Amino acid sequence: MDDCLCARCARTRETCCQFCEIYVSPGDARRIASHIGRHDFFEDRPPIDARYADQDDDPPWRDHVFQSDGSRRVLKRALSGDCGFLGSAGCVLPLEVRPIVCRLYPFEYDATGLKDELSEGCPTHLVRPGMSLLGELDMQPDDGRRWRDMLYDEITLESAFRADPLMILGETEPATADAARL
Ligand code: SF4
Ligand code: SF4
């Protein structure tokens, strides 16, 4: 029996869950914290990969997501570089709880919508004959458009979240230094 593209990908190379820097929107922070019961899973950090810092072609992303010191809220990673939510069988978070940027991968997008091209990060040489990359990943453009809209709505909450993270996390006391610092 054949297995999914992501499993074949993981057997042959580093996957997106091991090399991507994952932005955590205010809504992501709230959804994940509600699901796992803690919010020590994110931190403010400048990009390690300089390509994440070059957002001049997407002013809303540049202006809302990045702080004046060049940092933004991202998922913490293990020393190995793996995402903290990467388990032996893939992501441990349900799809509708995962950071929106994870759900969107490998769609490319900006403030105007989904782009025609896909990210080049997936191993297209492992796509089976007669299948498309999106077909292998069981991804629908309608979901991509919905998630992109959600993401760009949520980045506009950044200022309010940084001013009062407890408002969105629904807590009365900051549970972590990371959350308190926002
Ligand atoms: S989404 Fe693409 S890069 Fe990520 S694990 Fe699947 S095939 Fe690999
Ligand atoms: S949250 Fe899940 S899908 Fe996103 S990088 Fe981490 S393991 Fe991968």
Image (cartoon, rainbow, N blue to C red):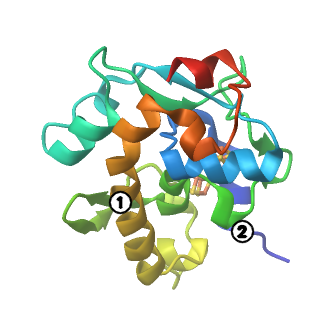
State left or right for residue 57 relative to residue 100: left
Percent coordinates x, y for residue 50 in the rendering: 31, 23
Judged from the image, the secondary structure of the residue bearing numbered disc 2 is loop
Nearest the viewer among 14 and 55 is: 55
Percent coordinates x, y for residue 177 in the rendering: 65, 15
Label 2: few (<14), some (14–19) or many (≥20) C-alpha neighbours in 10 Å: few
Percent coordinates x, y for residue 114 in the rendering: 29, 68
Residue occupying the point 39% across, 24% down: 49
Nearest the viewer among 58 and 181 is: 181
Residue occupying the point 47% across, 61% down: 104
Q: Quadrant of the N terminus?
A: bottom right
Nearest the viewer among 85 and 132 is: 85
Nearest the viewer among 137 and 41 is: 41
**Disc 1 marks which residue?**
153
Disc 1 to disc 2, C-alpha distance: 32 Å
Q: Quadrant of residue 166?
A: top right
Depicted 126 relative to depicted 30: above or below: below
State left or right for residue 159 relative to residue 37: left
State left or right for residue 21 relative to residue 63: right
**Disc 2 marks which residue?**
4
Residue occupying the point 32% across, 49% down: 156
Tag nearer the camera, 1 or 2: 1
Mark 2 CB near ligand 1 (8 Å cut): yes
Judged from the image, the secondary structure of the residue bearing numbered disc 1 is helix
Residue 77 shows in this picture? yes
Name the kind of residue labelled 1 in the image: Asp
Total marks shown come to: 2
Could you tell which of marks 1 and 2 lies nearer the N-terminus? 2
Depicted 75 relative to depicted 104: above or below: above
Residue 58 shows in this picture? no
Name the kind of residue labelled 2 in the image: Cys
Percent coordinates x, y for residue 81 in the rendering: 65, 24
